[in-house]
Image (spheres, grey):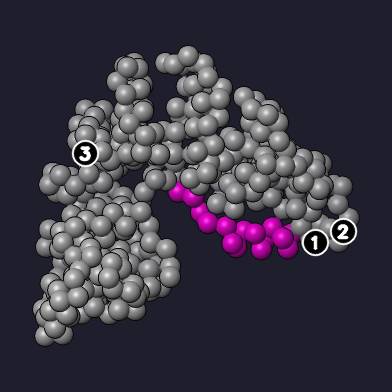
Amino acid sequence: MMNIGWRRRIVLIGLLATTGCTTPAPSHFASLERAAERGDARAQTELALLYAGGGEVEPSDEKFIAWLSQAAESGDPRAQSLLGSAYEDGRAVPIDHQTAIALHKKAAHQGESASQVALGRYFLFGVDTNFEPGRGLFWLRPAAEAGEPEAQALLGRVYLHGLGRKFVKRDPAEAEKWLTAAAEQGFAQAQYDLATFYFDAGDSKTGLRWLQQAAAQEQTEALTMLSHRYRDGDGFPADAARSAELLRRAATLGDPVAQTELGVALREGTGMARDESESFAWFEKAAIQGYTEGQYNLGLAYAKGTGVDPDPVRGTAWLEICAKEPHREAIRAVSPVRRQLSADQREAANELREQLTARLPELPAPAVRRW
């Protein structure tokens, strides 16, 4: 079974809660199946959700997609939205952004907020479509005004950072308004962004309050920032053990920035016992996610034999991948490593670099990464 993104899981849970069918009784399932077979689009959508979520029904991606497709063709906006999300994330169907956009448009025109948010993301960030911030905001705003926390959080983040001088200008008042609306609903990303807003505004007390709330929900950026504050004694008494605990938690949750920072701390023995082997393992996890700093440190580890047997071929490949970003330190580091290679080793490094590059994902810019 293919993975489904966290946004889509939230959508699924919300829709299941709406239908009240998370654990259906056999009699209810039978009546729902009969209604679906008669062409009832609502029943088809609910049946699809049961096959997605399990309960007393064995999960089936095939039946999930089949029933959802029938409901979407009948015009059910929830089905159109969820099917669009399946094509967006590659759940049980190949990733197909154009099909996803078409389905989301149908649902969004009927007021489906999840699809309005999806279209906002597509047009704001140019994911397999034109970069059209105006259209992105057009779709986000009604969802945000209807109380959709993800729309509010994303709208707030856009106004917090801006999108280039000629697209969307920074607007602190709008950023605070929308981030607060989402944060008060418990949306962790908005809580973190609101914390950074207040820190920048000089209100550390309010910033810490929102930062702790986001970290309590294991928002990885918040965990990492809170780790820094315990490390530096900024707002709290300095506590190296607590700082290390928070950073390790963010890294364990898969955040490549935290993984790289943890790797550096373990390599240098900063705030924790030195462990070069574990340091190498964290650099590798960050590097294969496409994070440049992780790639740089992994390349150095291979080149110098830090936590791993020296391998100048792999070191060169990783440093050259990183240097193309461009990464200044990698550019400086790769030349002496490559000069040590024989002609055959240089050819092997070139081949490995191309193989690794083909497998690496592209991380979006930090301002949009969590979406």
Q: Is residue 354 left or right of residue 159?
A: right
* Residue that carries the numbered disc 3 in the rendered image: 185
Residue type indicated by callout 3? Gln
What number is the disc on residue 343? 2
**Upstream in the sequence, badge 2 or badge 3?**
3
Q: What element carries label 1?
A: helix
Is 100 positioned to the left or the right of 234 in the image?
A: left
Residue span colored magenta: 350-364
Give the position of the N terminus as an image quadrant: bottom left
Which numbered disc covers residue 347? 1
State the image coordinates of residue 327 (x, y, percent, origin top left).
62, 40
At a point 52% along the width and 44% down the height, the residue shown is 252
From where the camera sits, is residue 42 visible? yes
Q: How many labels does the image show?
A: 3
Residue drawn at x 12%, y 58% as measured from the top left: 111
Hey, what amino acid is under mark 1?
A: Glu
Q: Report which quarter residue 71 is drawn in.
A: bottom left
| SS assignment at label 3 | loop
- Does the magenta run of residues contain 207? no
**Residue 59 position within the rendered picture, expressed as x and y whole percent measured from the top left:** 34, 72
